[in-house]
């Protein structure tokens, strides 16, 4: 059964099923919903696992699930990084669940995903698709969190929204700084700009776009200025792959139409503010280059998922340099 993410965000009690799947590119929303689940069930015992940990020792997991006592707290399992690989385990567990609840958290799952299809079609499960935030949803969060603050002008709201780059995690960090600093609940525009440190580029998308355009000097400069957070590496990878996939679609379309017509034809459409940047990128990338960069992003994902001790920030920076060099390759 599918639940709208904004409704679940407003009322976490809607997730009353024993099996729930939350997936999508909005990492910030998934984190918020996970925290709401925990806060709602303060008397429960939470067990946090990853899919890989379960697959490595399925017997232990089943024993953990089935060994319950009347005197134990309710057990709630939070399982991260799930994919189709865990579906058979879920199917086996579903009819045997008693008081236990299982929440699965996944990255983007396309419509071919068997896990997604199973949860969407079953009446005994819940699924929440966590789409990326847009300007409207981010603006609503800002207004709600800063309700009662003086000086919350339209311009200050725009400043906060733009600085968040439509990233809920970054937005919440910025809102925490604002509420901590402006304890008198009066926002001063100049102090706000200093507080948010707008001269520092925390926007990974700008770095990604410059690398894909092959702008070496700007890319090198941004690599030293951009705040890269290790826990967001999968999100960064998704942003890169989404743009690469769009460039691949455009490459095919331009075989039969002009670039401008292709950008207006592609679904979802290229936002008008991004069309010049996207057009510059499209002129740089060919089919062979796209195949090569997808190999690099695959290897990057494999490295960060299989080697916990590796320096993920170094890897993402190397990936951006490789992308920039590949964009300029003949």
Image (cartoon, rainbow, N blue to C red):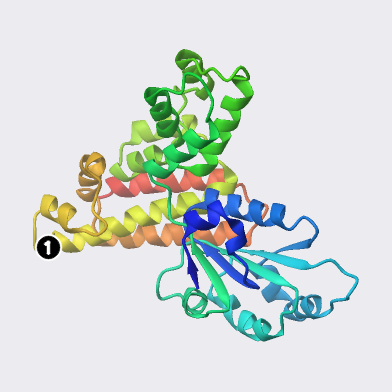
- Decide: is 317 above or below 123: above
**Residue 179 position by quadrant:** top right
The answer to which of 221 and 117 lies nearer the viewer is 117
- Decide: is 50 above or below 270: below
Q: Is residue 129 toward the left or the right of residue 250 in the image?
A: right
- Residue at the extreme left of the image, as rendered: 257
- Residue at the extreme right of the image, as rendered: 71
Q: Is residue 106 visible?
A: yes
Image location (x, y in percent) of residue 275 = 21, 43
Image location (x, y in percent) of residue 200 = 47, 25
Q: Which residue occupies 60% across, 31% down?
A: 176
Q: Is residue 300 visible?
A: no
Q: Which residue occupies 56% across, 68% down?
A: 21
Image location (x, y in percent) of residue 132 = 43, 51
Image location (x, y in percent) of residue 91 = 61, 84
The answer to which of 286 and 120 lies nearer the viewer is 120
- Residue at the extreme front of the image, as rendered: 148
Q: Residues within 10 Å of mark 1 (few under 14, many from 20)?
A: few
**Residue 85 position by quadrant:** bottom right
Q: Secondary structure at mark 1?
A: loop
Q: Is residue 108 toward the left or the right of residue 285 in the image?
A: right
Residue that carries the numbered disc 1 in the rendered image: 255
Q: Is residue 137 toward the left or the right of residue 102 in the image?
A: left
Q: Which residue occupies 44% across, 22% down?
A: 199
The answer to which of 45 and 297 lies nearer the viewer is 45
Count of marks placed on residues:
1
């Amino acid at each position: 059964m599918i639940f709208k993410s904004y409704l679940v965000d407003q009322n976490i009690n809607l997730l009353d099923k024993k099996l729930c799947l939350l997936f999508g590119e909005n990492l910030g929303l998934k984190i918020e919903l996970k925290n709401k689940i925990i806060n709602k069930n303060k008397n429960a015992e939470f067990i946090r696992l990853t899919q890989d940990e379960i697959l490595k020792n399925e017997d232990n997991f089943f024993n953990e699930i089935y060994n319950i006592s009347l005197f134990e707290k309710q057990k709630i399992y939070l399982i991260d990084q799930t994919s189709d690989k865990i579906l058979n385990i879920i199917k086996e567990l579903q009819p045997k669940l008693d008081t236990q609840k299982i929440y699965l958290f996944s990255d983007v799952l396309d419509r071919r995903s068997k896990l997604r299809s199973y949860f969407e079609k079953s009446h005994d499960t819940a699924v929440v698709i966590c789409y990326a935030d847009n300007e409207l949803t981010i603006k609503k969060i800002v207004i709600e969190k800063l309700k009662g603050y003086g000086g919350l002008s339209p311009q200050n709201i725009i400043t906060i929204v733009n600085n968040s780059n439509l990233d809920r995690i970054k937005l919440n960090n910025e809102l925490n700084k604002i509420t901590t600093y402006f304890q008198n609940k009066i926002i001063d525009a100049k102090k706000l700009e200093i507080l948010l440190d707008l001269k520092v580029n925390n926007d990974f998308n700008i770095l990604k776009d410059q690398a894909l355009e092959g702008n070496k000097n700007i890319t090198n400069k941004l690599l030293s200025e951009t705040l890269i957070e290790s826990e967001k590496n999968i999100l960064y990878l998704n942003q890169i792959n989404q743009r690469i996939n769009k460039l691949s679609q455009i490459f095919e379309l331009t075989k039969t139409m002009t670039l401008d017509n292709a950008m207006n034809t592609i679904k979802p459409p290229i936002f008008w503010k991004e069309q010049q940047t996207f057009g510059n990128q499209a002129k740089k990338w060919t089919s062979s280059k796209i195949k090569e960069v997808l190999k690099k992003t695959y290897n990057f994902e494999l490295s960060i998922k299989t080697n916990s001790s590796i320096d993920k920030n170094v890897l993402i920076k190397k990936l951006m340099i490789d992308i920039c060099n590949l964009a300029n390759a003949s």
